[in-house]
Image: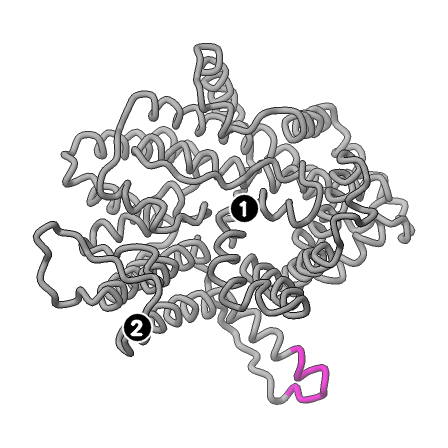
């Protein structure tokens, strides 16, 4: 079930809000958990079993780490916070390892088994040992959102172990945190410490609900009006057998808009739904295409993932505390794994490697480097071009296709005569209009987070109008993918 569907908007969401607000405060988390499992299991009920298993393991591990398993309830009902620094018992250490390993094993098997088997067979074939290949007939199905909820659930036990968060005794509350449908299948990745207080107590106000509706409306408009239109152009160009220099740039720019408005639109809808339920989720995008460097880009793009990788991977690896050489290696390694997190393919690994190498290179440049002395607009343009080349590997079907596409962008490919045919599709006024609109919104308009901070009557009217237009257009669109659902 996706947010931009009639099933969700006209059936699931109204029923969910009605039930949520109809029950007393004590029952809200149970209702929200059951609704979230229904939302998640709509595509495949077996997915619910996996999520429940991951939730149960991390819940038990959290109690073990906080030394609350089997302990009596304190008079105040609170679980004590572990000292941030200090020795941990062997039992606590084992519980943390069990949580991390179980989540990574779950993620690794379902996300990378097919990739590992195919790579293994390809290597054996390359060295002439085809007889030893696995040649498996079956393929493992990737559960929706597994990359998001495993990271989210795993961060809970790590934070409890580090003394950054209190363990939670109520299983329903913890299951609600893990499964909450607004951010379940495509983020943002919500850390437990960010919503722990809200799980205990939060306000439900008309102002918060109205801001949530505005967030959701703008996110829907981003997705349906802009991302889908630009995505159609990107698909035509990337799927073409041969493309011209101009078309290659138009295609990758269209894809850059598609993935940005698709994912930021989904994040806006998730944040909006959270507000309707009384939760305040953190910002996940901060105008990333205004970045003046790749380092700044990763402070603005998919903020919940970049900060997760920083706090749970980069810093534990040593961060920048072990010398320049180790810092560069850590940056490259973290982004390499970040690329692999997005997808089990060599194109994603190369995408991560490009960003990792750029982060390491920028780290070597001092404040007086030539690049830093360039005008801000020039640096924004150069950063955007680098991001465009990296998006080619993110979008291309395979590595040869990505290399061929990059060659076309550099004018190194000779287009076939039929390459000109796609122009009759991608340069239609309808698509050109939304490409221009995407550029205006990207570089000239305020962010949803800031625009909705203070709602006025004209803003509310515009939000509802955009929602109405999106719903009308949604009835005519057959093309309506959510890119990050596959991650």
Q: Is residue 127 magenta?
A: yes
According to the picture, the residue beneath numbered tag 2 turns out to be 88
Q: Position of residue 181 (x, y in %)?
A: 35, 43
Which region of the structure is painted magenta? Answer: 122-130
Which of 173/328 is in front? 328
Q: From mark 2 to mark 1, how far is it between C-alphas?
A: 33 Å
Q: Is residue 161 above or below residue 189?
A: below
Which residue is rendered at x = 71% and y = 26% of the image?
436
Q: Which mark is residue 302?
A: 1
- Where residue 36 sits, quadrant-wise, is top left
Q: For residue 334, what is the image quadrant?
A: bottom right
Closer to the chain start, of discs 2 and 1, is 2
**Residue 127 x, y percent position in the rendering:** 72, 86
Left or right: 480 with respect to 360? left
Q: Which mark is residue 477?
A: none
How many marks on residues? 2
Judge by depth and name the residue closer to the eye, 437 or 6: 437
């Amino acid at each position: 079930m996706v947010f931009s569907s009639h099933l969700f908007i006209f059936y699931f969401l109204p029923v969910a809000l009605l039930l949520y607000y109809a029950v007393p405060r004590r029952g809200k988390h149970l209702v929200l958990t059951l609704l979230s499992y229904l939302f998640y299991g709509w595509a495949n009920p077996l997915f619910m079993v996996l999520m429940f298993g991951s939730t149960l393991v991390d819940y038990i591990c959290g109690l073990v780490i906080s030394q609350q398993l089997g302990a009596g309830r304190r008079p105040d009902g609170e679980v004590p916070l572990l000292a941030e620094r200090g020795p941990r018992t062997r039992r606590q250490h084992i519980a943390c390892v069990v949580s991390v390993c179980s989540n990574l094993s779950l993620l690794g098997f379902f996300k990378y088994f097919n990739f590992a088997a195919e790579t293994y067979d390809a290597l054996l074939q390359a060295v002439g040992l085809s007889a030893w290949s696995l040649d498996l007939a079956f393929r493992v199905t990737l559960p929706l959102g597994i990359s998001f909820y495993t990271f989210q659930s795993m961060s809970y036990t790590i934070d409890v172990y580090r003394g950054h968060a209190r363990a939670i005794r109520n299983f329903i509350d913890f299951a609600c945190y893990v499964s909450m449908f607004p951010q379940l299948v495509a983020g943002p990745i919500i850390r437990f410490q960010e919503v722990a207080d809200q799980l205990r107590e939060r306000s439900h106000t008309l102002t918060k609900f109205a801001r949530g509706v505005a967030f959701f409306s703008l996110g829907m408009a981003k997705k349906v009006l802009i991302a889908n239109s630009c995505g159609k152009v990107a698909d035509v160009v990337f799927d073409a057998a041969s493309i011209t220099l101009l078309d290659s740039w138009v295609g990758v720019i269209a894809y850059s808009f598609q993935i940005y408005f698709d994912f930021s639109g989904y994040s806006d809808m998730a944040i909006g739904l959270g507000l309707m339920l009384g939760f305040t989720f953190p910002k996940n995008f901060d105008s990333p295409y205004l970045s003046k460097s790749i380092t700044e880009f990763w402070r603005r793009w998919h903020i919940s993932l970049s900060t997760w990788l920083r706090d749970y991977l980069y810093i534990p690896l040593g961060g920048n505390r072990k010398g320049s050489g180790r810092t560069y290696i850590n940056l490259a390694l973290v982004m390499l794994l970040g690329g692999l997190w997005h997808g089990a393919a060599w194109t994603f690994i190369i995408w991560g490697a490009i960003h990792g190498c750029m982060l390491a290179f920028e780290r070597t440049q001092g404040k007086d480097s030539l690049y830093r002395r360039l005008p801000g607009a020039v640096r924004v343009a150069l950063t955007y071009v680098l991001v465009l080349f990296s998006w080619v590997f993110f979008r291309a079907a395979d590595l040869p296709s990505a290399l061929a596409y990059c060659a076309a962008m550099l004018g190194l490919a000779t287009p076939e005569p039929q390459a000109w045919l796609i122009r009759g599709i991608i340069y239609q006024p309808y698509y050109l209009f939304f490409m221009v609109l995407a550029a205006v919104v990207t570089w000239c308009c305020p962010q949803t987070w800031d625009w909705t901070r203070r709602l006025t009557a004209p803003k509310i009217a515009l939000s509802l109008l955009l929602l109405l237009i999106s719903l009308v257009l949604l009835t005519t669109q057959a093309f309506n993918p959510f890119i990050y659902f596959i991650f």
